Amino acid sequence: MKNIFKLLFAAILLTAFGSCNKVADLPHYANGSAVTLSSNVTTLTPTPADSLNKVLILSWTDPKYATASSNQKFIIEIDSSGRNFSHEATFEVQGSLTDSLTAKQINDVLLGWGFAFGTSYPVDIRVTSSYANNNEQYKSNVLTLQITPYVVPPKIAPPSSGTLFIVGSATAGGWGNPVPVPAQQFVQIDSLTYEGTFFLNGGGAYDILPVNGSWNVKYNVADASVANIRSGGDFQYSTGPGNDIPAPPVTGMYKIHLDFQHGLFSVTKVSQYGLMYVPGDYQGWAPATAPTLGSPANDGNYDGYINIPAGGTYQFKLNTTPDWSNSFGDGGGGTLSSSGGNMTVPGAGYYHIVANTTALTWSATKTTWSLIGSFAASNWGNDIDMVYNVGNNNWTATITTVAGDQFKFRANHDWGLNYGENGTTGSLIVNGDNIGDASKNFAVPAGTHTITLFLNNSGYYTCLIQ
């Protein structure tokens, strides 16, 4: 039996060795190499008419990978020169040693970086080659081209007037048209961009006009109920009623930015006003609908103007919320008290009311308003009385000026309370610059003018010269 096992084992070994053949060495494939990139142009200045034309042809050498070209991948990388492709735009190519880009593709890339129309910029281009699975990547040489973005037709046609104005219940001038300028005029940043900082009454609405004094054309929104439209979104060109743009819910100063290229606007809060509501028997003791005093710095110092008509008891209170949860009354001797009685003025009139919730003081001064200035009828010595318009809640007067004339507004024919210009903003401040001082704001043109004074806006005041 032992011999039989030996014979079987020998037979197996012979069979095994007899079936083995020597195989040749496996082939060796060398690595690929970085491609050399070339372009058909060194400078590109396309126009809108070239948008769909292939204006840039890029070619590169064979990377000599071991597989068929269909398994090779190439990434075209484009970036502004000097950024080392840290903000690159990319285009992928499979199995080809060339690719073409349209003017629109290139223009979109440059505009996406914020480049200006009509300005030439150096742009770097390279190609990264690899297998289809991204193995064995090589980067080509870098080409630098000079490329000039072109103007894309804007989504919304900008105003041919080159001007824009804001109007509406949210603004200091209300729906009156023309509007106060420059207080309610936008600044043109470029041909497609406008911006302005404006006082907006919380919860109001507004439109944007290309021509001050005309309702023929305006910019507004297609749907005022769109979520967050108060903060911005799409706007439209309108020749009909349209939908007024709803203002932010809180009164304050806001920057409005209009982008006609993309048809978008944005509203950004600059500062929030503190408000104090003035409910009284003159308006039914309803805090939610009462006129307000304003605190531009939101620091507890409030002032504003309230018209109290004849009749009633001439009593009121001051509330820091549009309800009765935070109410101040008269603590006696011009003081505020949360437990004080009703405040009282002696009779009907247009009152300047001042309150300080830190010092706990208040006052109410009956005012009438006049113009005084260098114009002939005044000569800084004679007040030209203004007339109060109950329906519009503003004051008006007519004066005649010559070139170089200046004026101010003052209360009760006295310099104790007067308003002048606040720099070049178009708004008014106590003891401000003379209106019409061209060295500080703007010149009043020669002629006969209707002057309107707006004191009805929660601590923000302005005027209109027509």
Image: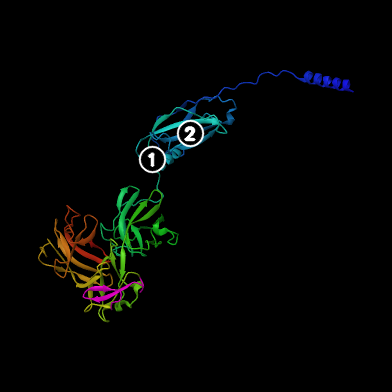
| Type of amino acid at the residue the image marks with label 1 | Tyr
Mark closest to the chain's N terminus, 1 or 2: 2
Residue bounds of the magenta highlight: 322-341
Q: Percent position (x, y) of residue 69?
A: 58, 28
| Type of amino acid at the residue the image marks with label 2 | Ile
Between the C-alphas of marks 1 and 2, the distance is 22 Å
Query: What is the number of the mark on residue 76?
Result: 2
Q: Looking at the picture, does residue 106 appear above or below residue 439? A: above
Q: Percent position (x, y) of residue 414?
A: 14, 68
Q: Looking at the picture, does residue 112 appear above or below residue 30? A: below
Callout 1 secondary element: loop
Callout 2 secondary element: strand
Residue 353 sits in which quadrant? bottom left
Q: Residue at x 22, y 54 (%)?
A: 424
Q: Is residue 242 left or right of residue 367?
A: right
Along the line of sight, the residue nearer the viewer: 77 or 153: 77
Write down the residue under mark 1. 150
Which image quarter is the C terminus in? bottom left
Q: Residues within 10 Å of mark 2 (few under 14, many from 20)?
A: many
View extreme (front): residue: 2
Q: Looking at the picture, does residue 420 appear above or below residue 310? A: above
Q: Looking at the picture, does residue 72 appear above or below residue 201? A: above
Along the line of sight, the residue nearer the viewer: 95 or 142: 142
User: Is residue 338 located in the magenta-colored stretch of the structure?
Assistant: yes
Query: What is the number of the mark on residue 87?
Result: none
Count of numbered circles on the image: 2
Which image quarter is the N terminus in? top right
View extreme (right): residue: 1
Q: Is residue 458 visible?
A: no
User: Is residue 31 located in the magenta-colored stretch of the structure?
Assistant: no
